[in-house]
Image (tube, helix red, strand yellow):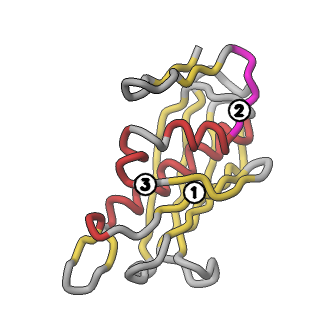
Amino acid sequence: MSQAHPPSGEKEFILPPGTVFDPKRFSRAMNRRGHGGFLGIDYHDHGDNWLELQLPWREDLVGNPDTGVLASGPIVSLLDNVTSMSVWTLRKAFQPQVTLDLRIDYMRAATPGKTVVARGECYQMRRNVAFVRGLAHDGDPADPVAHAVGTFMLVEGPA
């Protein structure tokens, strides 16, 4: 059984065995707390094998106060979250997995004041490994801020 511990006063978020993974519900529950909650990461959209999360610009996430550009860490976290959740979206189950490799290439700085949207896609799943790619942009997917490619080891095999 998967379980996350909520802040005091909130109900626990528990996924009973056999529950179909709902990216919107899971993202909203998990990103109210923890690292994603601190960063303000939120659900944006999803399909069968992809997911989009968004990271609104905030002054406290800026890496260079002179330019207002977001620090790289929040964008790395956004891409890590969206690519790993794309695996669960395709599997339709929240099951253990381990990041084997995640490469992120920055194309340019995010535009100050703009929300960064990241799309993660699980494009191939084998018996023990899922292959993912991701893209982060601040309004135009054809002009990305960063892209990612990675692999996740499926601890329990496909659902």
Q: Residues within 10 Å of mark 1 (few under 14, many from 20)?
A: many
Q: Is residue 55 left or right of residue 134?
A: left
Residue type, numbered disc 2: Phe
Q: Nearer the viewer, mark 1 or mark 3?
A: 3
- Name the residue rendered at 70%, 53% in the picture: 50
**Image height of 67 relative to 106, above or below:** below
Q: Residue at x 74, y 33 (%)?
A: 92
Most distant residue in the front direction: 9
Pinpoint residue 39: horizontal percent, then vertical percent: 38, 54
Camera-nearest label, 2 or 3: 3
Front in this rendered view, residue 79 or 128: 79
- 79 or 58, nearer to the observer: 58
List the residue tagged with mark 2.
Answer: 21
| Horizontal and vertical percent position of residue 156 | 62, 20
Residue topped by disc 1: 53
User: Nearest the camera: 95 or 22?
Assistant: 22
Q: Main secondary structure of the magenta part?
A: loop
Quickly name the residue at label 3. 40
Looking at marks 2 and 3 on the same chain, the residue that comes earlier in the sequence is marked by: 2
Question: What whole-number distance in Å separates the C-alpha atoms at marks 1 and 3?
Answer: 10 Å
Could you tell me the amino acid type at mark 3? Gly
Q: Amino acid at mark 1?
A: Leu
Write the start and end of the magenta stretch as one range. 17-22
x and y percentages locating residue 56 in the rendered image: 46, 66
Q: Which of pointers 2 and 1 lies earlier in the amino acid sequence?
A: 2
